Amino acid sequence: MEKILFDMHTHSSYSPDAEDSAEAMCEKAAELGLEVYALTDHCDCNFWYPTEHYFTDKQDVTDAMMYGAGEYAENSIAEQVRLKEKFAGRLDLRVGVELGQPLQYPEGAEKMAADPRLDFIIGSHHMNSGCDDFYYLDYSKMSAEQLDKLLTDCFLQMLDMCKWGKFDVLGHLTYPLRYICGEHNVSVDILKYEELIRSIFKTLISNGKGIEVNTSGLRQKYGQTFPTFELVKLYRELGGEIITFGSDAHRTSDLGKGITDGVELAKSAGFGYAAVFKKHQAEFIKI
């Protein structure tokens, strides 16, 4: 079996939707022989505080799992610092976080982005402002116009996040398709949003930021990476050089899954190197 060199997007039980402890995730990464490993527990900024801070009359988030996201992330980072020392010599652990919706609570996002303990920040967009996570939406009840507005707003807000830019790579660019296409079997012509995606890529490139190939879709109903080959190739053609690979594992059994397939996809798109991060500086590994 081909060795998995890295996994830069994973979650422990400090993420409310994950199963296994940070120590168990590190132990599994060491067993797999990963050269570089990042834990990137959730910090969805719009859930930094409990309900009285976040909710308004126009918002009805159906699950409270992310309340107190700032506290979860802080505890994860502290534990990662401990584990980095414990696993020294066995595992090159990079201290990370997945920073969701930073512009929906910029004060918290700025605080997290400035944490000197962090090596690596993934910037993610899981929900439009004032809406539920894309996971919770019922796409069967949406008209084509409503779905188009949802995705247009998604990429516009993602573009604003990229202009803010206090992260290292953009996570799972096409995350909504996990649910729209994968779970609800609703077809989307993603190229309809190509100009917006081009703007996102150009902004990332000009700011020295990268994208990830998130391989979680390969083991889900969607059956493809986030983003797909065509968009990874577009990023490369526009001059993109920084690319990371992450399984988005929420349990030890998924750690490293799909990474070798993601690497082959990137190589086909013209990439010769993967990036890993230390203190927000990209280090390149030949693939």
Image (tube, rainbow, N blue to C red):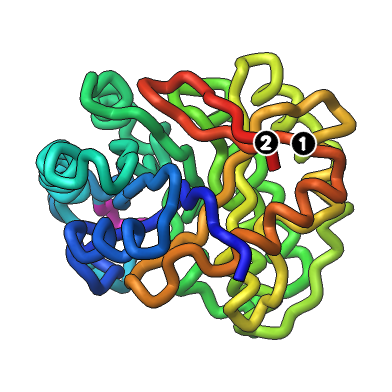
In the image, residue 87 sits, relative to residue 20, either above or below, namely above
Is 145 positioned to the left or the right of 244 in the image?
A: right
Image quarter of the C terminus? top right
Q: Quadrant of residue 236?
A: top right
Crowdedness near tag 1: few (<14), some (14–19) or many (≥20) residues, C-alpha within 10 Å: some
Q: Amino acid at mark 2?
A: Lys
Read off the residue under disc 1: 272
Main SS, magenta region, reads loop
- In percent of the image, x 56 and y 67: which residue is there? 216
Count numbered badges in the picture: 2
- Distance of label 2 from label 1 (alpha carbons): 6 Å
Disc with the residue nearer the chain's start (2 vs 1): 1
- Residue 173 appears left or right of 49: right
Q: Are marks 2 and 1 in contact (CB under 8 Å)?
A: yes
Q: Is residue 141 visible?
A: no
Which of the two residues, 93 or 162, is positioned nearer the viewer here?
A: 93
The x and y percentages for residue 54 are: 24, 48
Name the residue located 34 percent from the left edge and 64 percent from the top edge: 31
Disc number for residue 182 = none
In percent of width and height, residue 95 lies at: 29, 37
Is the residue 145 above or below the residue 98 in the image?
Answer: below
**Magenta extent:** 55-59
Closest to the observer, 249 or 155: 249
The residue lying at 49 percent from left, 28 percent from top is 168
Q: Secondary structure at mark 1?
A: loop
The residue where tag 2 is placed is 286
Q: Name the amino acid type tagged 1.
A: Gly
Residue 1: image location, x then y, percent: 60, 71
Q: Nearer the viewer, residue 28 or 205?
A: 28
Q: Say which residue appears at 25% left-offset and 73% top-offset.
A: 19
